[in-house]
Image (cartoon, rainbow, N blue to C red):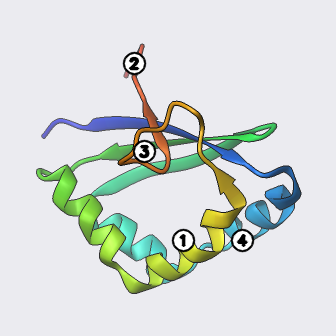
């Protein structure tokens, strides 16, 4: 099975950095379980000043279906109601994305 590597970016409001980092130090177990059930592994979020960078690996067979299952999860929706207002889209984000997916330029195992 091939691993799909995904990198994404989004802005973080300067006034929200401390709270964003505090809540991500203890993400709700139901949100984590939903991510894992959707075949996401090795998921990390990094912050550089006012920019968040997410990296994840997808190991499933139907990415769109698995992402829809995350979006449909009630606890994840509740989490996003908290985290969403802390974030700000980058100008490059498309109409169908919140976090902007960026191309992979290099990889080595």
Badge 4: residue crowd in 10 Å (few <14, some 14–19, many ≥20): few
Against 29, residue 108 (above or below) is: above
Q: Secondary structure at mark 2?
A: loop
Residue displayed at 17% across by 61% down: 65
* Real-space Cα separation, disc 2 to disc 4, in angstroms: 30 Å
Residue 30, percent from left and from top: 45, 82
Q: Quadrant of the C terminus?
A: top left
Against 36, residue 12 (above or below) is: above
Residue displayed at 39% across by 18% down: 107
Q: Which residue is mark 1?
A: 80
Q: Which residue is mark 3?
A: 56
Q: Nearer the viewer, mark 4 or mark 1?
A: 1
Q: Secondary structure at mark 3?
A: strand
- Disc with the residue nearer the chain's start (3 vs 4): 4
Residue 96, percent from left and from top: 35, 48
Circle on res. 23: 4
Q: Nearer the viewer, mark 2 or mark 4?
A: 4
In this rendered view, identify the residue nearer to me: 18 or 95: 95
């Amino acid at each position: 099975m091939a691993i799909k590597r995904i990198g994404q970016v989004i802005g973080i409001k300067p006034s929200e950095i401390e709270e964003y980092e505090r809540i991500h130090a203890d993400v709700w177990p139901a949100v984590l379980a939903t991510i894992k059930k959707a075949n996401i592994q090795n998921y990390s979020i990094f912050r550089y000043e006012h920019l968040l960078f997410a990296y994840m690996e997808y190991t499933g067979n139907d990415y769109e279906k698995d992402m829809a299952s995350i979006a449909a999860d009630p606890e994840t929706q509740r989490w996003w109601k908290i985290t969403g207002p802390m974030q700000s889209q980058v100008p490059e984000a498309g109409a169908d994305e919140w976090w902007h997916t960026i191309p992979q330029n290099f990889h080595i195992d």
